[in-house]
Image: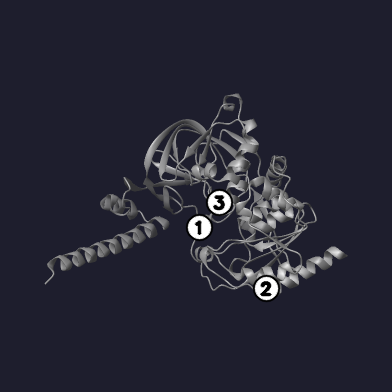
Amino acid sequence: MNRGGVSARFKSGRSAMAERLRWQLKKLVLYLVRHDVRIARYVVEVLGTRLYRGSARTRVIAMHWLDEYGIPPQAELRASLAGVSFGPKIDGRLRVEAVELPAVRLYRFTDARICSNSSSVLLRDRILVERSVGVDPRRCSYSAGFLLMHGQRSAYVCDLEEEYIERGLSLCGNGSFNYYHWTVELLAKLEFVGELGRDSFDLPLLVNKVIVETPSMREMLRALAPRRDLVVLESKKTYRVGELIYINAPSTCPFNLRPGESSEVSDFLFRPSSIDYLRDALSSMPGPSTIARKKRVFFARRQGRRNYNQDEVFEILASYGFERVFMEELTAAEQIQVVSNADLLAGPSGAAWTNVIHSRPGTQAVFWMAEEARDFSCWSNLAELVGVDLRCVTFPTGARSAAELYDRDYVVDATRIRLVVESLLGDSDQ
């Protein structure tokens, strides 16, 4: 008998069993925290570091929404105001919902902790979470970074390796690695830097490492804050900041939705003046003039997440004069130039549509997204705010959650896209 082989298989089986047990315990704790069950705190204390391998400590602490926390903001930079949210234009129908755009507020914290990819501030014994004000928080999940899970009153957090920073303005937040979240929610905060007072002239900006490593994102940051010092935050660390300046996002939507929830048109809160700021400030960004003007642009994607019948769709679009562009491979200035020169845009739902804010009024466009997300209203709001006629084609996927939609491959009816393009071209001829 090969005793060594038996021993190895036994150890392997025991390790697999331990990992399954760890996973089940993690699921239990996440469930308890999400539902604010008091016993969660004691379960975590008993289990210690066994739930998250390599973590120094996990704990359950009190949670507050940033906009409801007892300490008032230092300043209200912009008052709340009545607004509207525009849903996608599907089959000629467009839903418009009245919303309230939250106030933009300045907060100043002493000895607070942040991480690069979370819109939350960790204090000694509690965490403050920025939310989409006015959206039912029970439908939403803002878990990211050191915030592993939250309910309405409690949070499950992980104490990562800690580093000290003397002071800074946070441009970190949920989805800071994503072109859309970075541009519309985080970069847009720079509009208010000039209103922070004299002591903020040399205030450094705290940014996710991804920003400086991604040319297009770094380019936009330097265009809006050319002389500001940057402090680069890594993803697996907590940063204790002696003096933290925090501004809530001027435009927002829920970062993630709970299982079983789907987007609603009223979830999307866009402040028109903030979009105008981005459009104006970034339009003057220096860039090449060597890119040939493309009147009809197709936002192509490399194979990866959400693969679809792209070649079939492009074959149809090419017959109408569309040219393929991989936006993520261009500089920010080139992306702006491509979109601002185009008369007609087409492509799947994705962060590339953030650039629609740079389109000329009267530009026409079509995009496609899952039927299960038919009220997802980021691109429709941005388009309406700048005068773009954006129409939407939907397709079924069978996905049961927003998380499933994020990765699921699909097939879109290319004929429906062709019909929308013909309709747009017919309108432009009139």
Colour scheme employed for the rendering of this structure: one colour
Cα separation, mark 1 vs mark 2, equals 37 Å
What residue did someone put label 3 on?
A: 178
Helix, strand or loop for disc 3 = loop
Question: Disc 2 marks which amino acid?
Answer: Ala
Query: How many residues crowd mark 3 within 10 Å: few (<14), some (14–19), many (20+)?
Result: few
Helix, strand or loop for disc 1 = helix
Q: Quadrant of the N terminus?
A: bottom left
Q: Quadrant of the C terminus?
A: bottom right
Res. 210 in view: yes
Residue 414: mark in rendering: 2
In percent of width and height, residue 408 lies at: 52, 68
Q: Is residue 290 above or below residue 370?
A: above
Residue at 56% x, 54% y: name it: 254
Question: Disc 3 marks which amino acid?
Answer: Asn
What residue did someone put label 1 on?
A: 138
In percent of width and height, residue 229 lies at: 55, 31
